[in-house]
Amino acid sequence: MTAVLDARGIVMTFRNGDEFTRVLLGVDVTLDPGELVALLGASGSGKSTLLSIVGLLLRPTAGIITIGGERVDTLSDTKSSLFRNKRLGFIFQFHNLLPDFTALENVSFPAAAAGGGITSAIRQRASELLARVGLSDRMNFPAARLSGGQKQRVAIARALMNHPELVLADEPTGSLDRASADQVLALMREINREDGTTFLICTHDEQVASRCTRRITLVDGQFDSGMRNKTN
């Protein structure tokens, strides 16, 4: 079985003038198909940095990254962008929706950007995803008119638009009240179970971590051994 993610020896060093700060010190992480994994660690531990590296938004100082059997750390910027668009999904803490675009336009954007516009097939896919996340009645609403929980559900639908092999979520419930956070987490768990979509979720929330199938914790730039939860 080919791993969805296989990252080996990931080192990340940031330079500020003559000073160098090593954030990741040779991290190894593997995700199998269908896993729902929580990425934990104290503030400043490098969680978001690692997520950005896996998402091809940052280049590591050293290390090898393979996603779906393809080595990606050596891709050019153009090829990295294409790979990111077609094979990865992203969910951010503050959703990053285009406020004047409708929910349907926001969900369509990853496919429309690559294809040059919203085709009937793209519109159909976006409509189905919005129905999946319970927003059929909001698909023509501008994002600015949606609640925080609704915006994050639109962000989940957008992340799934191009049938990604891996969805990366950075504090996806961090800006939500508890009820909305629980709804968003339940939706991600449902998609993981029913579709087999692999998720890597960066979180400070123990309630989120406890409902994932596995947790991995960054400590001093390296991982503690991954723990499997007793229940999902």
Image (tube, rainbow, N blue to C red):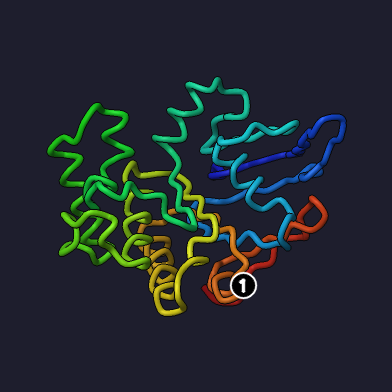
Q: Which residue is at 36% across, 68% downward?
A: 149
Q: Quadrant of the N terminus?
A: top right
Q: Which residue is at 66% across, 41% downward?
A: 7
Label 1 element class: loop
Side (left or right) of 84 relative to 214: left
Q: Which residue is at 63% across, 59% downward?
A: 39
Q: Position of residue 77 (x, y in %)?
A: 53, 23
Q: Amino acid at mark 1?
A: Asn
**Residue 180: quarter of image:** bottom left
Side (left or right) of 75 relative to 154: right
Q: Residue furthest bottom?
A: 179
196 or 73, which lies in front?
73
User: Does 222 sit above or below residue 20?
Assistant: below
User: Does 19 sit above or below residue 165?
Assistant: above
User: Does 70 sit above or below residue 174?
Assistant: above
Q: Position of residue 170 (x, y in %)?
A: 54, 55
Counting every numbered tag in the picture gives 1
Q: Position of residue 202 (x, y in %)?
A: 59, 58
Side (left or right) of 6 relative to 198: right
Side (left or right) of 143 relative to 171: left
Residue on which disc 1 sits: 229
Q: Residue furthest left?
A: 120
**Residue 162: quarter of image:** top left
Q: Residue furthest right?
A: 18
Q: Which residue is at 52% across, 58% downward?
A: 35
Q: Position of residue 46 (x, y in %)?
A: 71, 50
The 10 Å Cα crowd at callout 1, few under 14, some 14 to 19, many 20 or more, is some
